[in-house]
Image: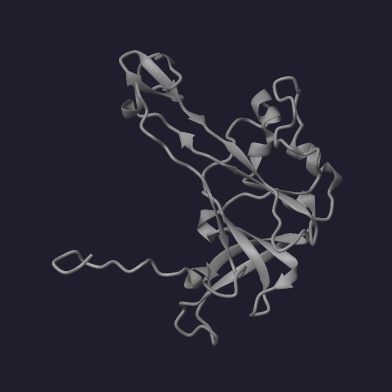
Amino acid sequence: MLFTSAHPGDDHPYSTEVAPGLAAPFHQHLFSARLDMTVDGLANAVEEVDVTGLPIGPDNPHGNAIVQRVTRLTRESQAGRRADSARGRTWRIVSTERTNRFGHPTSYTLYPESAPVLLADPASSLAKRASFAANHLWVTRYDPRHRYSAGDFVNQNPGGAGLPAFVAGDRDIDGADIVVWHTFGPTHVPRPEDWPVMPVARCGFTLKPTGFFDRNPTLDVPPPPAHCPSGPGTR
């Protein structure tokens, strides 16, 4: 259900009037997924992959070529990143020790939803306690003590706990045992249709194998058993 309050009238800039005199403020639902990646072993790295078109030239006479721009994230301080739908940005978690039959690193790709990160002012108490939500992606060296992206005691902390503290050491994350943290979730501008009972809203992200297998693994799935039509003389 929506959190509601009295509506002050007219076009209020921070809320929607969902019933006469009743307002539902604009808000965000932001989640943090802790992905303890082990892609073909513990030695992993993260590559940021953007796609872009190229101008017409000798190698692209028709102007329809598309290329990937790959940036390797090598330090924790470098790995606070944001999604960019204009570049089709994804993040590829690769093995630094194993390759597939084409000689490329075995990997999995994180496909984010390019929704806004935390919109609260950086000086607010909310932003200080939920600093993890300032980025869509963080990458840290594995540490068993680092379990929660906002720290262990959120309401009792003045700010700075969790991921900002985890990356303060600026450790190497290239070919290491790493954890990928992904922030996702919708920014909700309520509608009158959301009151009094909200319809279902869905959010999430996708992890897909990218060259992890040497070929499509469904090729080995056995066919379903044969089905015989029923009729006279059949059993």
* Picture residue at 63% right of the left edge, 38% below the top: 133
Where residue 62 sits: x, y (%)? 44, 82
Residue 32 left/right relative to 179: left
Its colouring scheme is: one colour
Q: Is residue 55 left or right of residue 98?
A: left
Which quadrant of the structure image shows residue 4?
Answer: top left
Name the side, left or right, on which 232 lies relative to 142.
left
In this view of the protein, which residue sits in the foreground, 193 or 62?
Answer: 193
Residue 147, compared with residue 227, is above or below; it is: above
Q: Is residue 68 above or below residue 173?
A: below
Instruction: Name the residue at 35% across, 27% down.
Output: 194
Q: Nearer the viewer, residue 154 or 121?
A: 154
Image quadrant containing the C terminus = bottom left
Task: Please give the name of the residue rendered at 36% of the width and 67% of the height, measured from the top-left corner.
Answer: 225
- Is 152 located above or below residue 206 in the figure? above
| Closer to the camera in the image, 175 or 80 | 175
Is 27 situated above or below 116?
Answer: above
Q: Position of residue 19 (x, y in %)?
A: 32, 18
Task: State the count of labels.
Answer: 0
Q: Position of residue 104 (x, y in %)?
A: 67, 75
In percent of width and height, residue 135 lies at 64, 44
- On the rendered image, what quadrant is the N terminus found in? top left
The answer to whether residue 27 is left or right of residue 110 is left
